[in-house]
Image: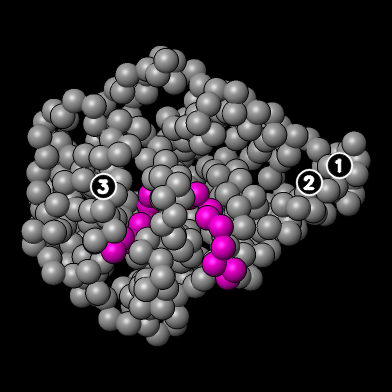
Amino acid sequence: MEWAVIAIYGLLALVAWTNAFFMTRPREIGSPAGFVALIPARNEAGKIGGLVATLCSQGVPVIVYDDGSTDGTAEEAARAGAQVARGPATLPEGWTGKNHACDQLAKLAAETSSLEWMVFLDADVVPGPGFAEGLGSLISTVGFRCPVITGFGRLLPGRGLEPVYLFWVPFLLLATNPFGLVSRARLGHNRFLNGQIVAWRSSEYFRWLPHQAVKSRILEDVLIGRLLARNGVRVEVADLSRVMSVRMYRTMGEALDGMSKNSHEITGSVAGTVLLGFFMVLLAVGWWFGWPASAALLLLACLGVRTVVRTPLWVLPLAPLSCFFGALTMARSLVWRKRGVRWKDRTYSPEG
């Protein structure tokens, strides 16, 4: 048991540090913005204006799709300089809100913009001063071989234990998926997208119509990543923490609800979700069996993950607690799957 635990933590540390060293990063000085930003938004007043204003100040044209907001989101976005389209009060049958909004945004971009690239952004993204140039540099350097670019921004911490709770998400991704090695070797596929930011060459988007393909699903980004893998479409997963941040949730309660809505779709099955939950429990308690070597390797893995998402240092010793939270989320997500998911004041039907 001891050596098995040490081996698991050692592998996690190895993957995390290969990502820290080898993931693609934007250049310090890049190309001018050559893309249109597309933002699906529902009740995002208070932050949509700042996001739009920052993008516009960097020369990025912005289209916002207001998905039935009731808080003045559309007006705030328009004042900040965005082209705003308003969606219907009731979604078309079979669609989730974000998928429908993104599908409509792509059509609007095709009608109104001649730019080759379009970038979908969540409203909780906080672009840095060099965002447009940095993303432009990635498009110019890897876009010729990868028609889809996604990545990880810096995670801005919420209040209280929210940073501890949420750490299991980047840990699970960056310590198990060798994004950097796949990028450097140009072999294989990570089967992944991060819906917070996805840049598409327009022709490739309309070839696959990805949001239509997963229109009824909540975890659309990971499912689209798998769709692209099945069809051999290359995706670059970059470390974008130098040019953008993301504030996902303000409190632990918000984070728990936000992750519970779709975590059951990570593995694609109930059995897979249960196994992933048990794996998270093993990560939470396993360090004890291989002490002190396993504890040191766990901390080393956490440090590797932190180089990308810039989690506060005080969170890292509490990583076992975060893994427990991850297991709890898997269980809660299965319950939500059966009862139906309520999110952004909409209820989506339970799955069979």
Q: Are marks 1 and 2 in contact (CB under 8 Å)?
A: yes
Identify the magenta region.
184-202
Residue matched to label 1: 4
- Identify which residue is drawn at 63% across, 32% down: 276
Task: Name the kind of residue labelled 2 in the image.
Answer: Ile
Task: Give 174 or 192, whichever is nearer the viewer.
Answer: 192
Task: Name the kind of residue labelled 1 in the image.
Answer: Ala
Residue matched to label 3: 209
Say which quadrant the C terminus sits in: top left
- Identify which residue is drawn at 81% across, 38% down: 286
Residue matched to label 2: 8
Secondary structure under badge 1?
A: helix
Q: Which mark is on residue 116?
A: none
Classify 193 as above or below 42: below
Residue 133 shows in the view = yes
Looking at the image, is mark 2 or mark 3 nearer the viewer?
3
Q: How many residues crowd mark 3 within 10 Å: few (<14), some (14–19), many (20+)?
A: some
Task: Name the kind of residue labelled 3 in the image.
Answer: Leu
Q: How many residues crowd mark 1 within 10 Å: few (<14), some (14–19), many (20+)?
A: few
